[in-house]
Image (tube, rainbow, N blue to C red):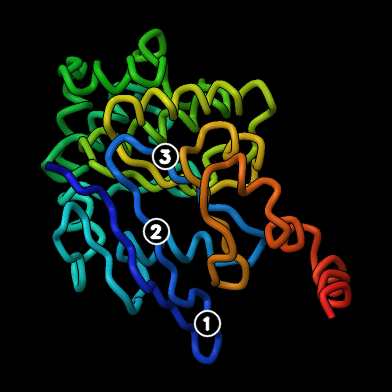
Amino acid sequence: MSDGLSVRGLRVSYGGVHALSGVDLRVPPGELVGLIGPNGAGKTTFVDAVTGFVRYGGDVELDGADLSGLSPHTRARRGLARTWQSIELFDGLSVAENIAVAASPRSGWATLRETFRGPVGLGGEIERTLALLGLESRADTKAGDLSHGERKLVGVARALAGRPRVICLDEPAAGLDSDESVQLGRRLRAVVGAGVGMVLVDHDMALVLDVSDQVVVLDFGHVIACGPPSLVRNDPEVVAAYLGSTARATRTEEAS
């Protein structure tokens, strides 16, 4: 049985700066865990470390298997995928072709050469991914003609193309309006409902608190709160972290 993603005692330092200090987080299959915190809290560093892009201390396991020392692409092949804050699509290719490039076990350039020789047929996995994210009607649309919200969904679809067991999303709602953010949340819940574990990093608090099963809050590289959204949203430490140093100083004076 799949165990999902397990992170224990994750530590990342840049020189004398501790970006992450002993972070624990677990993502069971089919569960969405929101990771939030103020700017500089260590959220993107967490994703970078877990997916193998920065060196770290501590333990990262996927389905009980230790990922220590594995490259990012090897982790992806094991079932741990991610998205990036910047959306890098092939604007001259269709939505389906963009997903096909990501889904291919061969090199991207080999897939591109085949793409330009003729149209790419929709495989079952690509069709499933398009349906999951509500992109069926845009399958043949060039990526360059999509709205910003649709481009974000294609970015998620590309990460799903390799059939990951866990996916880490880094700021997928950045630049979206409120309606697009709500639509994104529905699609993310559909992905989780299909059995994929998910870590959602985003500054859109309404989105994260609305769609997450559990929420982990970072501040200066430390976990300051963890639990269901209903509890985390009113946690005094979380409120103080988001209001800034003035609120923290006030709480310290009140406690003394």
Q: Quadrant of the C terminus?
A: bottom right
Residue drawn at point x = 56 percent, y = 27 percent: 149
Name the residue beneath numbered marker 3. Answer: 32
Q: Quadrant of residue 11?
A: bottom left
Q: Which callout, 3 or 1, points to the residue nearer the camera?
A: 3
Q: Give me the disc on residue 18.
A: 1
Q: Give me the disc on residue 25.
A: 2
Q: Residue 22, percent across and down?
A: 43, 75
Mark closer to the chain start, 3 or 1 = 1
**Dot 1 amino acid type:** His
**Dot 2 amino acid type:** Leu
Secondary structure beneath dot 1 equals strand
Give the crowd class for mark 2: few <14, some 14-19, many >=20 residues within 10 Å. some
Residue drawn at point x = 55 percent, y = 71 percent: 222
In the image: residue 130, left or right of residue 242: left
Q: Where is 99 relative to 222, above or below?
A: above
**Dot 3 amino acid type:** Leu
Q: Where is 245 relative to 119, above or below?
A: below
